[in-house]
Image (cartoon, grey):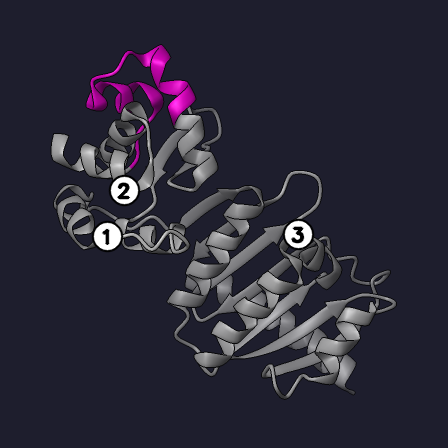
Amino acid sequence: MQTIVKYLESAFQLSCYEAKLYVAALQLGQANVSELAMAAKLPRTAAYPPLKALVKMGLVSPIKEHGKHTRYVATEPKYLETLFNRKRLDLDEALRLMSITQHSGEEITFRYFEGSGGIEMAADIFLRESKTKLWKTFENAQLMQELSGQYRFGKYVEARVKKRIRARVLLSVDEPTEWMRTVMAESNKYLLEFQRVSHKTYPLEASVAVSGEWVLVAVAVRKPFALLIRNDALAKTIESIHDIIWERYSL
């Protein structure tokens, strides 16, 4: 464990406590603060600040159960490269070591990502895990434009196009901005299909995308966050709702 902690400290610039708690979360699968602190051999009171920092970075996600203490789950090591893809880090040895301690129990199907950086990370994972060649999305495009910026949006679309994935977009907006009109005019280039819907009728304040069994929900207003869910029944339900609205506006 000590070797893995040292790798995390040097490669990812984590504090000693942050690294120990992340490794403990990997080992336990799901755990509350007390269990994590015990596994990491830290005082319980000292675990709160580094745990909060790990949640903010997207390395650990909280799972709140009604009437119970919040439990936490670590982001799988295979996604660390996505988290730190801008730092050109050599992850091979660190990932090999961490895979030894990764929890091998039932797969967690829910992830919470905090902040605008968390939304970008969740979107990157959604793209990476997508196996279908068609996304069906509900978009409040103006909100996402303001959150991610045109440059980031363009790079993400390029990555999707490179994988030859089309996006069928229900755009909730009454009057497109100039930037939106430009994107819509080049829809073939970006492998996009658009259907504008009334924002009054469908006042979407979040973006929702579905691909196979994966669902991505991103909220950009007030306190930005994203949810990444892997559940076939939920994905099929959202896809069916998308189809109903798409067909209504296609008539």
Q: Is residue 133 visible?
A: no
Horizontal relation, residue 117 to residue 179: left or right: left
Depth order, front residue of 37/83: 83
Residue 133: within the magenta? no
- Per the image, the residue denoted by label 1 is 91
Work out whether mark 1 precedes mark 2 in sequence or the reverse, and give the earlier one: 2
Classified by dominant secondary structure, the portion drawn in magenta counts as helix
- Calculate the distance from the C-alpha at mark 1 to the C-alpha at mark 3: 29 Å
The residue lying toward the viewer, choosing from 100 and 31, is 100
Give the extent of the magenta segment: 30-50
Q: Earlier in the sequence, mark 2 or mark 3?
A: 2
Give the residue type at disc 3.
Leu
Name which residue type carries label 2.
Answer: Ala
Q: Nearest the camera: 2 or 59? A: 2
Placement of 196 over or under 27, stated as above or below: below
Task: Give the residue drawn at x 45%, y 60%.
Answer: 124
- Local secondary structure at mark 3: helix
Badge nearest the viewer, 2 or 3 = 2
In the picture of the structure, the residue carrying the numbered disc 2 is: 11
Q: Are marks 1 and 2 in contact (CB under 8 Å)?
A: yes
Structural distance between the alpha carbons of marks 2 and 3:
28 Å
CB-based contact (under 8 Å), mark 1 and mark 3? no
Mark 2 is surrounded, within 10 Å at the Cα level, by few (under 14), some (14 to 19) or many (20 or more) other residues, namely: some
Q: Are marks 2 and 3 in contact (CB under 8 Å)?
A: no
Residue at the image position 66 percent from the left and 65 percent from the top: 138
Residue 84 visible in image: yes
Query: Disc number at residue 59?
Result: none
Label drawn at residue 147: 3
Question: Callout 1 environment at 10 Å: few (<14), some (14 to 19), or many (20+)?
Answer: some
